[in-house]
């Protein structure tokens, strides 16, 4: 059964969404292509790039979930059992996994992160196709395409047998093997699915005289960033730039744009922080600054207590004792990773919960 078409809708700000949600994968890829010597195969990342990509984008975007949950008194009141249970469950589960073995903890966190990254792209696809004329078949093609855009590069990573100059969190967090049969079959399926999607879009454009630009930019950006970040390039800088920028920037933009739209249209309790952040467009500076502050504190604790890799950036945390005892690490590491694990799990609930209430 076909669904009625309506005018294409944006989340709330066409220009903002174009810059911060749709363009990041293309900007990141262009940056990588302009500097191939620095990006293509190197396993080295300059400190300044690490601060920008990891601290100011990757870790910072995790804390943007706070504005949709713990910083919002209405959400905190309505969903406090969930908002208490999820971090508690994540911490206890993380401690048990780390006691079993540090590699099991990092592996579980890595695959949870991968699932979160994949689902984000599916979520954006649905946002920008929600008013599109579609049948069950066209909807299925869209879904299969966006999942294929992310899963095929991951299968290549797992089964190519190639030494990668990058990892998701730590060395050994993914289970790797080598299978030429899997690579060949999945490569042909990958190309076939992309071809079917293109044919479907051309057919829709001819028959409906419509072209859903933001949806197709989401699909194209996902295909390009995941393929070039994992399959084509073999460099830590390339993978991190394409992976982090394409995921973190759009997520933060979605949170800010969506919460500002809700702030200006819904009569709810508004704290001073919410007023400062969403009452004007200038509030985005407060939004970003607070996220970066939290990210800096977290990474400083990681560096001071565990990694000891970026003392020039986190020199004020150098006074902390480096932890080496396994039992203490089993308590500390899941605690430091709690913002990430909570973010990955909560993100699977918070958008559905809001939609249900609205």
Image (cartoon, rainbow, N blue to C red):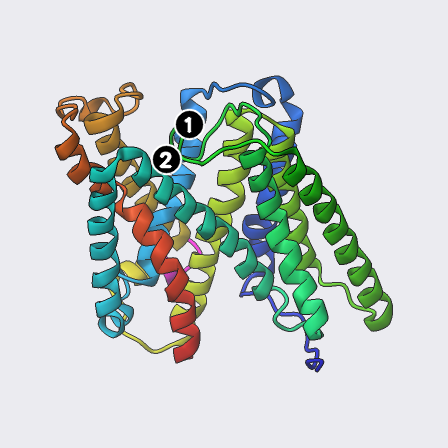
Graded by Cα atoms within 10 Å as few (under 14), some (14 to 19) or many (20 or more), the crowding at tag 2 reads: many
Note whether 20 is above or below 139 in the view shown.
above
| Residue 5 among magenta residues | no
Give the residue displayed 37% in from the left and 35% down from the top: 55
309 sits left or right of 234 in the view: left
Disc 1, SS: helix
First along the sequence among labels 2 and 1: 1
Q: Nearer the viewer, residue 302 or 119?
A: 119
Q: Quadrant of the C terminus?
A: bottom left
Note whether 87 is above or below 308 in the view shown.
below
In the picture as drawn, the residue positioned furthest to the right comes out as 206
Q: Nearer the viewer, residue 293 or 282?
A: 293
Q: Which mark is residue 61?
A: none
Graded by Cα atoms within 10 Å as few (under 14), some (14 to 19) or many (20 or more), the crowding at tag 1 reads: some
Q: Quadrant of residue 225?
A: top right
Residue 214 visible in image: no
| Residue 280 among magenta residues | yes
Q: Which mark is residue 50?
A: 1
Note whether 268 is above or below 67 in the view shown.
below
Q: Nearer the viewer, residue 66 or 259?
A: 66
Give the residue displayed 55% in from the left and 41% down from the top: 154
Q: Main secondary structure of the magenta part?
A: loop
300 sits left or right of 132 in the view: left
- Magenta-colored span: 277-282
Number of residue marks: 2
Q: Quadrant of the N terminus?
A: bottom right
Residue 160 coordinates in the image, percent (x, y): 60, 31
Pointers 2 and 1 in contact (C-beta within 8 Å):
yes
Rounded to the nearest angstrom, the CA distance separating label 2 from label 1 is 7 Å
Give the residue displayed 38% in from the left and 30% down from the top: 170
Q: Which residue is mark 2?
A: 55
Residue 64 visible in image: yes
């Amino acid at each position: 059964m076909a669904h009625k078409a309506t005018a294409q809708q944006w989340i709330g700000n066409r220009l903002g969404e174009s810059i911060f949600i749709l363009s990041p994968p293309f900007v990141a890829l262009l940056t990588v292509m302009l500097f191939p010597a620095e990006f293509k195969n190197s396993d080295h990342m300059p400190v300044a790039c690490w601060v920008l990509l990891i601290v100011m984008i990757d870790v910072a975007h995790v804390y943007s979930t706070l504005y949709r949950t713990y910083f919002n008194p209405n959400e905190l009141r309505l969903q406090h059992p969930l908002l208490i249970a999820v971090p508690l469950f994540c911490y206890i589960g993380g401690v048990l996994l780390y006691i079993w073995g540090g590699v099991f903890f990092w592996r579980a966190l890595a695959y949870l992160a991968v699932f979160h990254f994949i689902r984000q792209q599916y979520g954006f696809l649905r946002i920008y196709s929600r008013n599109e004329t579609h049948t069950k078949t066209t909807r299925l093609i869209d879904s299969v395409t966006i999942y294929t855009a992310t899963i095929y590069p991951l299968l290549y990573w797992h089964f190519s047998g190639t030494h990668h100059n990058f990892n998701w969190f730590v060395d050994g967090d993914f289970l790797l093997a080598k299978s030429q049969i899997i690579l060949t079959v999945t490569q042909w399926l990958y190309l076939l699915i992309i071809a079917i999607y293109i044919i479907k879009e051309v057919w829709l454009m001819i028959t409906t005289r419509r072209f859903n630009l933001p949806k197709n930019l989401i699909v194209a950006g996902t295909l390009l960033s995941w393929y070039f970040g994992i399959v084509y390039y073999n460099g830590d800088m390339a993978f991190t730039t394409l992976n982090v920028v394409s995921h973190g920037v759009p997520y933060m933009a979605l949170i800010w744009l969506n919460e500002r739209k809700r702030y200006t249209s819904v009569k709810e309790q508004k704290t001073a922080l919410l007023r400062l952040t969403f009452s004007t467009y200038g509030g985005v500076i407060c939004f970003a600054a607070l996220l970066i502050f939290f990210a800096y504190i977290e990474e400083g604790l990681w560096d001071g207590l565990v990694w000891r890799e970026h003392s020039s950036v986190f020199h004020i945390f150098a006074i902390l004792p480096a932890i080496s005892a396994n039992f203490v690490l089993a308590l500390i590491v899941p605690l430091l990773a709690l913002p990430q694990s909570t973010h990955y799990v909560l993100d699977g609930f918070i958008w559905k919960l809001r939609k249900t209430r609205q």
